[in-house]
Amino acid sequence: MDFDLDADQRAILDAVDTINARHAGATRMRELGGDEPSYDHDLHKHLREAGFLDLALDERPLDAALVAQAVARQLGVVAAAYHALVLPSLGLDVRRGSRPTPRSW
């Protein structure tokens, strides 16, 4: 088995790292409250607008997991794994608005 990242996955991680460098990290976490930070809606907005929270909906769950791991690694205070992995696995699509809606029943 080949466990190396492909070119698309490396590009996704590079782009997520750029967003994280601008909108995440220890300093941002302290700004949001330190040990009990509030939710980072700004980081969430940037990840959503770039499409990184919708990858599993596009049948790319491994890429979505890589995004969630990259955000967590940089102390991003968002529910990246929830939005990128859990909601799609439940068949819920949140691309259309802030409330989860069923894709198909």
Image: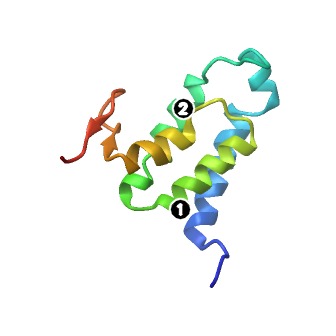
In what element is the residue under mark 1? Answer: helix
Instruction: Give the amino acid at mark 1.
Output: Leu
Nearer-the-camera pick, 57 or 6: 57
In the picture as drawn, the residue positioned furthest to the bottom comes out as: 1
Which label number is shown at residue 44? Answer: 2
Q: How many marks?
A: 2
Instruction: Give the amino acid at mark 2.
Output: His
The location of residue 30, given as percent across then percent down, is 79, 20
Residue 66 in view in this figure: yes
To which quarter of the image does residue 93 belong?
A: top left
The location of residue 81, given as percent across then percent down, is 55, 43
To which quarter of the image does residue 36 belong?
A: top right
Give the residue drawn at x 73%, y 39%.
21
Left or right for 2, reference 50: right
Work out whether mark 2 precedes mark 1 in sequence or the reverse, and give the earlier one: 2
Local packing at callout 1 (Cα closer than 10 Å; few below 14, some 14-19, many 20+) is few
Looking at the rendered image, the disc whose residue lies closer to the viewer, 2 or 1, is 1
Give the residue drawn at x 58%, y 65%.
9
Residue 53 in view in this figure: no
In what element is the residue under mark 2? Answer: helix
Label 1, on which residue? Answer: 62
Left or right for 22, reference 47: right
The quadrant of the picture occupied by the N terminus is bottom right
Nearer-the-camera pick, 82 or 6: 82
To which quarter of the image does residue 11 belong?
A: bottom right
Query: Quick check: 32 above or below 94?
Result: above
